[in-house]
Image (cartoon, rainbow, N blue to C red):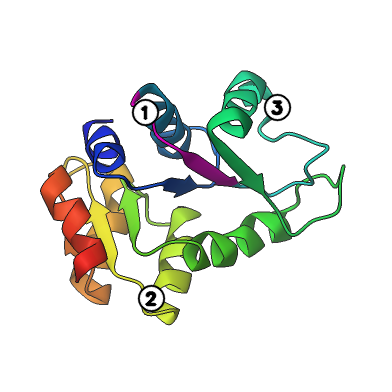
Amino acid sequence: MEITAGLVARGHIIVGTGSYGFAGMAHRAALAAGGHTVVVSASGLGRPFPAGDGDLLTRITERGAIVTELPPHRAPTKWTFIQRGRLAAALTDAVLIVEAGFRSGSLNVAGHATALGRPLGAVPGPITSPTSAGCSRLIRDHGATLISTTDEAAALTTA
């Protein structure tokens, strides 16, 4: 939340997938800080997803945008979750992955970011936590920058 608020204070727009967990938290933090945020949806615009975050998605449409490549009312599928990673990476200047497990869907976004030449940062959690395995792998094997402060995250876009 602190990194997101700091990035918003510097004029950054937060782009994410709208998913539960850290993505949803980043969108909430951006809005709370008075910033703008964009959700890349895995469903059509007439079918908000995740449905449990309807209030958040409504607030995002007031201070940002929800984008998708899908026709209205299209339900999300395994393929559309994977597909949106390409668009999310393409809409950013840099990608920051937070506490991703070894098989986290956010690693798909990281892969697209790397293919597009976007700077990649990772914020792992505790080193012994399974939810840090994906970030650790990004840092160790894929050249992601270890991020622990807003300054470090902001520096990704000037790299």
Q: Quadrant of residue 5?
A: top left
Q: In the figure, is residue 147 to the left or right of 12?
A: left
Q: Position of residue 87 (x, y in %)?
A: 58, 64
Residue found at x 45% / y 55%: 106
| Amino acid at circle 3 | Ala
Q: Position of residue 26 (x, y in %)?
A: 39, 35
State the mark number for residue 124. Answer: none
Under circle 1, the secondary element is helix
Residue matched to label 3: 51
State the mark number for residue 29. Answer: 1
| Amino acid at circle 1 | Ala
Residue 144 visible at all: yes
Label 1 near label 3: C-beta < 8 Å?
no
Front one among 58 and 120: 58
Q: Is residue 52 above or below residue 104?
A: above
- Identity of the residue furthest to the front in this view: 11
Q: In the figure, is residue 26 to the left or right of 128?
A: right
Label 2 vs label 1, nearer the camera: 1
For marks 3 and 1 on the same chain, the one whose residue lies earlier in the sequence: 1
| Amino acid at circle 2 | Thr
For marks 3 and 2 on the same chain, the one whose residue lies earlier in the sequence: 3
Is-magenta flag for residue 35? yes
Q: CA gap, disc 2 to disc 1?
A: 26 Å
Q: Quadrant of the C terminus?
A: bottom left
Residue matched to label 2: 114
Residue found at x 23% / y 59%: 136
- The segment highlighted magenta reads 33-39
Q: CA gap, disc 3 to disc 2?
A: 30 Å
Q: Is residue 109 above or below residue 8?
A: below
